[in-house]
Image (tube, rainbow, N blue to C red):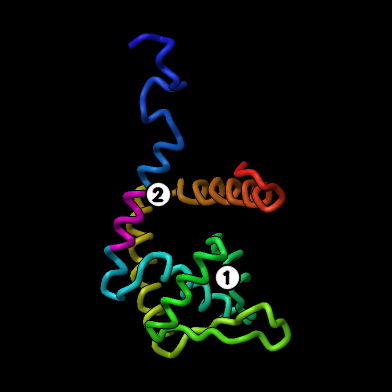
Amino acid sequence: MKAHDNPFKVEKPEESTGFLLWQVTNLWQRSIKKALEPYDLTHSQFVLMASIHWLHLHEQEVTQIVLSNHTKIDPMTTSTVLRTLQQKGLLLRQEHQTDTRAKTVALTEAGIRIVKEAVVAVETFDRDFFSVLGTALGGLNTNLLNLLHHFSKHINTSNESF
């Protein structure tokens, strides 16, 4: 290969952090999808349902925008997924009592039952998947939180991606 044809700054693919993250994320998402199959939930549906349940347990009023901000799922996708969950009978959406622009969301009894079971399955899978990291897991979580906080602030204050 001619040097002027090579735009890569790395010698080997495993030196690319983004590529490694993409590969691990794909493996993890494929496995999560399998773990959620018995509950007839997509990963996005699970994340939204688990977040609704989490926020309710922590006595927070859950609106679509609160949910979107909590999960980092864009508002349009959040709305679409919530509509699907409502059609499945797992979720109720109602007009907000004081804000006519907002909708509150809550899980139905069936939704609560399913999400409780699915959370156990996902947490078990995550524990097994990430156990290979041993004591390094805390450092990974800290680094992921640093990235999340840095780029969430930047994206929220800018029209650009980064």
- Tell me how far mark 1 sits from mark 2, CA to CA: 31 Å
Dot in front, 1 or 2:
1
Report the side of 111 relative to 145 (left or right). Answer: left
Q: Nearer the viewer, residue 46 or 121?
A: 46
Residue 118 placed where, x, y %? 36, 74
Count the labels in the image: 2
Residue depicted at x 62% and y 70%: 65
Q: Which mark is residue 67?
A: 1
Residue 23: give x, y in percent of width and height.
35, 42
Q: Amino acid at mark 2?
A: Gly
Residues rendered magenta in the picture: 25-33
For mark 2, what is the residue?
134
Quarter where residue 45 is shown = bottom left
Q: Is residue 5 above or below residue 28?
A: above
Mark 1, secondary structure of its residue: helix
Q: Which labelled disc corresponds to residue 76? A: none
**Residue 74: x percent and y percent?**
55, 61
